[in-house]
Image (cartoon, helix red, strand yellow):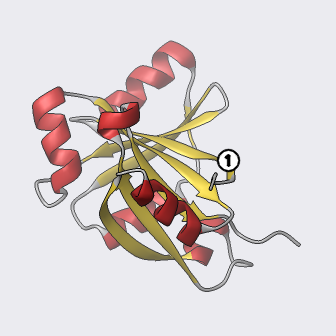
Amino acid sequence: MAVNIKGLFHIEIVVPDAEEAYRFLNKVFGAQKVEEHIPAYLEEVLPGIRVIHVELGGVVLQLVQPTEDLPSWHKQLKENGPSVHNLTFLVDDLENAVATLKSEGAQSIWSIDLEKNRVFGEEATGEMPVHMIDTMDKVGFRFEIAEAPKEG
């Protein structure tokens, strides 16, 4: 069964120095920091990580400077250098999306519950399960997926 993707939330890129990567993108393209509340929340949940959200050409890049405590990111940075770690999408039905990816041979790396209001604003309530699914060998990146907030 096909999965309905609501939209791209961000492209996550591992870098050795998030601030330096931001300075480069800002100087060359005028990229700006955005959604600063999300990186602040992630840094609270994952101590030691450095995260910056940058808007570049209408797309949000999540620059992640990982520590050794984040094995998937750290290993990729160490082995491949700065590169896309995952694309984060919002989906209509998270359970279906995870099941469909797994039925195609993708492997779950981890899942975490985040507070919706810390990501989407005060009007959003409850927890937001987020899943990292390894599809690197199939499409060249991992899927990080979360259920889109219900509209209306």
* Left or right placement of residue 36 versus residue 111 in this view: right
Res 122 quadrant in image: bottom right
Residue 76's place in the image compared with 112, above or below, is: above
Res 10 quadrant in image: top right
Instruction: Give the position of the N terminus as an image quadrant.
Output: bottom right
Q: What residue is shown with label 1?
A: 7
Q: Nearer the viewer, residue 17 or 27?
A: 17
- Where is residue 145 shown, x and y percent of the image? 51, 58
The tally of labels here is 1
Label 1: few (<14), some (14–19) or many (≥20) C-alpha neighbours in 10 Å: few
Residue found at x 40% / y 27%: 23
Residue 38's place in the image compared with 77, above or below, is: below
Residue found at x 69% / y 77%: 124
Residue type, label 1: Gly
- Where is residue 68 shown, x and y percent of the image? 10, 54
Residue 145's place in the image compared with 30, above or below, is: below
Residue 129's place in the image compared with 148, above or below, is: below
* Left or right placement of residue 115 versus residue 134 in this view: right
* Left or right placement of residue 98 versus residue 107 in this view: right
Q: Dot 1 lies on which element? A: strand
Outermost residue toward the right in this view? 152
* Left or right placement of residue 25 versus residue 18 in this view: right
- Where is residue 36 shown, x and y percent of the image? 53, 54
- Where is residue 67 shown, x and y percent of the image? 16, 53
Q: Nearer the viewer, residue 137 or 124?
A: 137
Residue found at x 48% / y 63%: 98
Q: Nearer the viewer, residue 71 or 57?
A: 71
Residue found at x 36% / y 44%: 135
Instruction: Give the position of the C terminus as an image quadrant.
Output: bottom right
